[in-house]
Image (cartoon, rainbow, N blue to C red):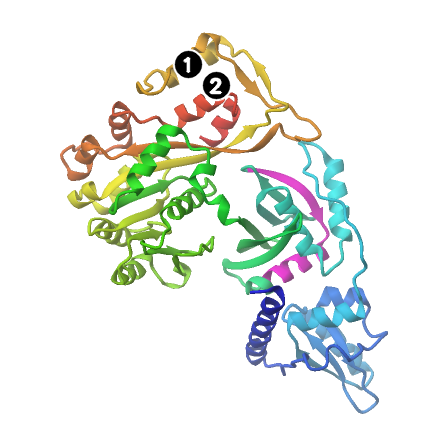
């Protein structure tokens, strides 16, 4: 769909939503599309700043016997309307208000206050204690044209490779932070009027309410252009009321289908061989575990892409759909409004899929349904919140009890983390002290035979070096994986053959069978000069 068609559909939806809200608020609704390109706003009634700040426009100036007419939006403060009513009451006149859409408001303002063509400086991330950079970025954001500030912020965050934008209310200012390579960095402090613009635009596009007293979730898309190439940026929006107003987190998913490729994830040869062997079979279950932001979805989608062919039917159940991939049937599941993965899974199994991806296993009903699907000729991929593979096993056993069927269903559990990668152009080697060497030896002492034991006595570690081109000494991230193949020894825990079902015991059994733990994978990456021990301690 081209951009003009997308904008037209958005405008239609915006007008329909506004008409519904007008009925709820008891205000007359005004569709301005037929005249917004020709009518001039009344001058000298409201200043441009007042129009933007109060999200309203003066449409008609009345005489002695007629009313003044204003177009207001759902974001117009009630206190300002009361002030206007008092003003016109003193003049023996009155003000009539018509609810117009946010799209209508912006169309009027584009004609009344045409945007000036201005080139704004790119946002820079401040180092710790660098208040001058934060001040400079704050001044830039406070000066960006009102109708561009939101798009500018999104564009800059994507340019910096941020995964999240955090808009946070403080007592005296609005803090903007970006999460880059897994770490949060402050970039600006904004005036309150900028906050209202950003939040108002965000709420309008994601169909959320700025006045809600409950947490909200939404979704929106935005087209970006880089070097003449257009990409579609997906965003998941989370808003929650706080002490000083609504806080928002915008999660960015820079959608590029070519990135969803196992070859581009930097997975080790042994781990990749195990993944290829497991997903190449027509049945069974694969679980991805790890905290939010550890790359689970990207790895799962890469597996699905590897399986995506004309002779397979692939169905996904997601809350929400994060990437749109051709050749798959993707079904959004709104679990916040009573829908469940289990109910949808039972329904889609009637469609005879070969591969099913369930966004997340959160309850015993979903777990049991997914297990049943995996032993009846389907390959089931899903995520589960746990820190390690052994903790995931222990938690699932607690959730569904001893289950012999599960022991034959589950084939592979992967725990994943993302570690910041050292900048190869600036990193610096150093020799670890004796205490660190002893710790490294203790971590790596039980490595399986297929992993070459590094010589710790002569090994070097690496530290980040800050430079103008690399403000933190890191550039990008690497994947580290802990992969537990479900062998006969592991199945005993699920069948009830072993009574002591604890994460520690399961991990010991898996390590005896050749599993390399997350910590060991991280330490090996540090010894290869890819990351640091500090980063391993922060993430793992």
Disc 2: which residue: 527
The answer to whether the residues at label 1 and label 2 have Cβ atoms under 8 Å apart is yes
Residue shown at the point (50%, 30%) measured from the top left? 538
- Residue 234 coordinates in the image, percent (x, y): 54, 54
On screen, residue 446 above or below 487: above
Q: Which mark is residue 190?
A: none
Image quadrant where residue 383 sits: top left
Q: Is 17 above or below relative to 374?
A: below
Q: Nearer the viewer, residue 449 or 372?
A: 449
Q: CA distance from mark 1 to mark 2?
A: 8 Å
| Residue 150 in sight | yes
Label 1 element class: loop
Residue 16, image quadrant: bottom right
Q: Which mark is residue 454?
A: 1
**Mark with earlier residue (1, 2):** 1
Q: Is residue 527 magenta?
A: no
Q: Quadrant of the C terminus?
A: top left
407 vs 434, left or right, is left
Percent position (x, y) of residue 411? 25, 39
The magenta span reads 183-203
Q: Position of residue 138 (x, y in %)?
A: 74, 46
Q: Can you see residue 80? A: no
Residue 100 image point, x, y percent:
66, 76
Image check: 186 left or right of 372? Answer: right
Magenta region includes residue 192? yes
Kindly give the residue lying farthest to the front in the view shown. Answer: 310
Is 338 above or below relative to 295?
below
Q: Residue furthest bottom?
A: 65
């Amino acid at each position: 769909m081209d951009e003009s068609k997308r904008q037209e559909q958005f405008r239609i939806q915006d007008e329909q939503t506004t008409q519904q809200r007008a009925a709820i608020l008891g205000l007359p609704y005004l569709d301005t599309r037929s005249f917004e390109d020709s009518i001039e706003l009344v001058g000298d009634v409201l200043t441009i700043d007042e129009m933007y700040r109060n999200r309203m426009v003066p449409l008609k100036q009345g005489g002695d016997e007629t009313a003044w007419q204003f177009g207001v939006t759902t974001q117009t403060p009630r206190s300002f309307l009361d002030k206007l009513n008092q003003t016109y009451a003193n003049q023996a006149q009155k003000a009539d208000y018509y609810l117009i859409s946010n799209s209508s408001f912006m169309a009027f303002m584009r004609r009344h206050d045409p945007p000036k063509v201005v080139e704004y400086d790119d946002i820079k991330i401040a180092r710790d204690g660098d208040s001058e950079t934060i001040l400079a970025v704050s001044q830039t954001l406070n000066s960006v044209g009102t109708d561009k500030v939101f798009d500018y912020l999104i564009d800059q965050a994507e340019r910096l490779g941020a995964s999240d934008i955090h808009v946070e209310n403080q007592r005296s200012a609005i803090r903007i932070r970006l999460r880059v390579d897994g770490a949060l960095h402050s970039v600006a402090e904004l005036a309150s009027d900028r906050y209202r613009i950003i939040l108002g635009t965000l709420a309008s596009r994601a169909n959320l309410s700025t006045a809600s007293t409950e947490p909200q979730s939404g979704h929106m898309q935005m087209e970006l252009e880089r070097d003449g190439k257009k990409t579609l940026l997906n965003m998941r929006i989370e808003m929650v009321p706080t002490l000083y107003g609504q806080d928002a987190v915008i999660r960015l998913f820079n959608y590029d289908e070519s990135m969803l490729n196992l070859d581009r994830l930097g997975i080790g040869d042994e781990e990749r061989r195990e993944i290829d062997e497991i997903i190449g079979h027509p049945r069974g279950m694969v679980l991805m575990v790890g905290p939010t932001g550890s790359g689970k979805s990207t790895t799962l989608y890469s597996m699905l892409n590897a399986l995506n062919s004309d002779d397979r039917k692939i169905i996904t159940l997601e809350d929400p759909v994060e990437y749109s991939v051709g050749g798959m049937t993707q079904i959004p599941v709104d679990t916040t409004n009573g829908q469940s993965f289990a109910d949808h899974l039972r329904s889609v199994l009637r469609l005879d899929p070969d591969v099913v991806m369930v966004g997340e296993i959160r309850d015993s009903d979903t777990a049991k349904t997914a297990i049943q699907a995996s032993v009846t000729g389907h390959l089931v991929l899903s995520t589960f919140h746990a820190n390690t593979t052994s903790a995931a096993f222990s938690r699932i056993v607690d959730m569904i009890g001893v289950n012999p069927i599960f022991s034959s269903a589950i084939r592979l559990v992967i725990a994943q983390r993302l570690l910041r990668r050292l900048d190869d152009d600036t990193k610096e080697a150093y020799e670890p002290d004796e205490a660190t060497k002893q710790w490294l030896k203790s971590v790596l002492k039980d490595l399986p035979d297929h992993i070459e034991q590094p010589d710790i006595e002569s090994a070097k570690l690496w530290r980040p070096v800050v430079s103008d081109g690399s403000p933190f000494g890191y550039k990008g991230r690497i994947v580290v994986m802990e992969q537990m193949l479900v062998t006969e020894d592991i199945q005993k825990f699920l069948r009830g053959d072993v009574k002591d079902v604890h994460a520690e015991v399961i991990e010991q059994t898996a390590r005896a069978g050749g599993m390399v733990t997350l910590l060991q994978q991280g330490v090996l990456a540090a010894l290869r000069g890819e990351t640091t021990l500090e980063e391993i301690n922060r993430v793992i």
